[in-house]
Amino acid sequence: MTETLAATPGPARTTSRPSGLFGLTPTSGIGLGLALVWFSVLVLIPLAAVVGAAAAGGWGSFWNTLTDAQTFAALRLTVLEAAGVTVVNAVIGTVVAWVLVRDHFFGKRVLDVVIDIPFALPTIVAGLVLLSLYGPESPVGINIVNTRQGIFLALLFVTLPFVVRTVQPVLLELDADVEEAAASLGASRLTTFRRIILPSLVPAIAAGSSLGFARAISEFGSLVLISGNTPYQTEVASLKILKFIEGDNQAGAAAVAVLLLLVAVVTIVVLDLISRRVARRG
Amino acid sequence: MSIEVRGVGKRYGDFVALDDINVSLPTGQLTALLGPSGGGKSTLLRIIAGLESTDGGSVEIEGTDATKLPPQKRNVGFVFQHYAVFKHMTVAKNVAFGLEIRKRPKAEVKAKVAELLELVHLSQFAHRLPSQLSGGQRQRLALARALAVEPSVLLLDEPFGALDAKVRKELRDWLRRLHDEVHVTTVFVTHDQEEALEVADEIVVINEGRIEQIGTPDQLYDEPANDFVMSFLGEVTRLGGVRLRPHDIDLSTTPGAPESHAGVVVRSLRVGFEVRLTVEVEGHAEPTLVVLSRTHARALDVDAGSRVWLRPTTGATAVPVLDVATA
């Protein structure tokens, strides 16, 4: 009995192990093919086209576009604002997720739903919302239109849910046991958070932060109304791209786009590396 | 006394988890809190550790009143059923955690960790992550981690509950030997009477938030204070006017012994080394269960249909059946 049981899985497994080109069964081959075609049509080919367009004018014109003082100012403003927003989100988003998971208070469910509103709103509506409260006719007397603080606020608004929504499920899954064990070993609440809880959260915080950062450097809709679009002052990269296109400078637009793409990729890779390091070190 | 619990109670809404518990546990002993699930034994252990607050009464550990102390200040080691290891730390880091919190010098931490890993036979796994260990190894890691801070008491909450039967038994023997080596006052919670009888110096039987009996394994088994303790510690059957253990019945295939009850075997079941006979005794409403060794049953040549005479073994633990008693 035991012999037959032990004997069957061996051969069965070897025969079911696919022998095709990439070690795939016919079904997984079709699945992978479909995924790749889909991904290529939607993402890879358009991206390649943009890179191609940026390269069309040659390296010199690419470099000149990016080092043009006004373009450079716009790119710098975009990246710095996005970085600042990401840092704030990483902290506040974690705190909000913590409150939503660990605390019990009246209206928790409502707050949980409200968090998603920036996701659900068209971003131009987000701009409109901020404009009506902090615009020229602000009922509270604060006017942020055409300021860098305004851009910061708009970016915070649209990127709020990312960290909250990635950290929340991880916090829910954490064992209470582990924190109790740390407490009985003499660790204070703060130490337990820093050495036990945070390392488990860092991958989620990093994932949420990179999503938020990518969103922030590409934000357009809410900034159209808020930023005022003053060159050297409040002009961001996405609006700069629009200006290039309106000025019939496709290559310039593509050059800025490619740079944004590079920044996004580098940020995602760096955050991933950080999260791996922290999660391992504890 | 190492742990002194006086008048401790705990309610969750209408549910009474613990009701006026008084117990003192001597230094250096291995004590089992035994009882059915939901009986309050884990709650009592968590109150001693400070992981749960008490509604009233006091908890004293090593002579100091700990009732209001947070778990960090009680100097207890706690081991959880599901290990509660720190997943992102290596085995060595897990064990070092409590010592690092106490800001011990690095060399001392290193030496202590090496010593403890030796003790729990995990030295060769020092640099692995807990996910690379088996359940039994993880629980030994949790034990080493708890022992690292040299706790005045070691508390274990169903420590072997999540392990399979064979590992459970090995770890049980190992815990007993470890305790004989380390001599730290130890309290462990279990719902497995065999585990408690085998490992503990003293057993506290807890049911429905109350203590049913406190005693050594022998006392509990031989002189159970009540029906609950008797039936919780092992199988119980009825013969004549008394309740007794199925292996405390003498079975004979010939009449003549005084005060014996005649009956017929209706069912015979062999389980490993023992034979369980169900006997319908004349004048009894419910059948009596008799357990014999395989060799004894073969020598007597009893099987379903045999006519037999039963009487309690001399010196058997037997309690009179009350009207309300249920079998």
Image: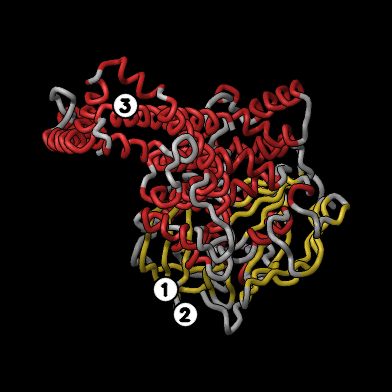
Q: Secondary structure at mark 3?
A: helix
Which chain does tag 3 point to? A
Point out residue A100 in the picture as x, y percentages from the top left corner.
Answer: 53, 58
Q: Secondary structure at mark 2?
A: loop
Q: Are marks 3 and 2 in contact (CB under 8 Å)?
A: no
Q: Are marks 3 and 2 on the same chain?
A: no
Dot 1 amino acid type = Glu
Which chain does tag 1 point to? B
- Quarter in which the C terminus of chain A is drawn: top right
Which residue is rendered at x = 57% and y = 83% of the image? B324
Between residue B146 and residue A63, name the one nearer to us: A63
Please give left or right for residue A116 compared with residue A279 in the image.
left
Residue A109 — which label? none
Q: Secondary structure at mark 1?
A: strand
Dot 3 amino acid type = Ala
Point out residue A49 in the picture as x, y percentages from the top left corner.
Answer: 20, 28
Please give left or right for residue B318 compared with residue B254 in the image.
right
Give me the C-alpha separation between circle 1 and circle 2.
Answer: 7 Å
- Quarter in which the N terminus of chain A is drawn: top left
Query: Does residue A174 appear in this view?
Result: no
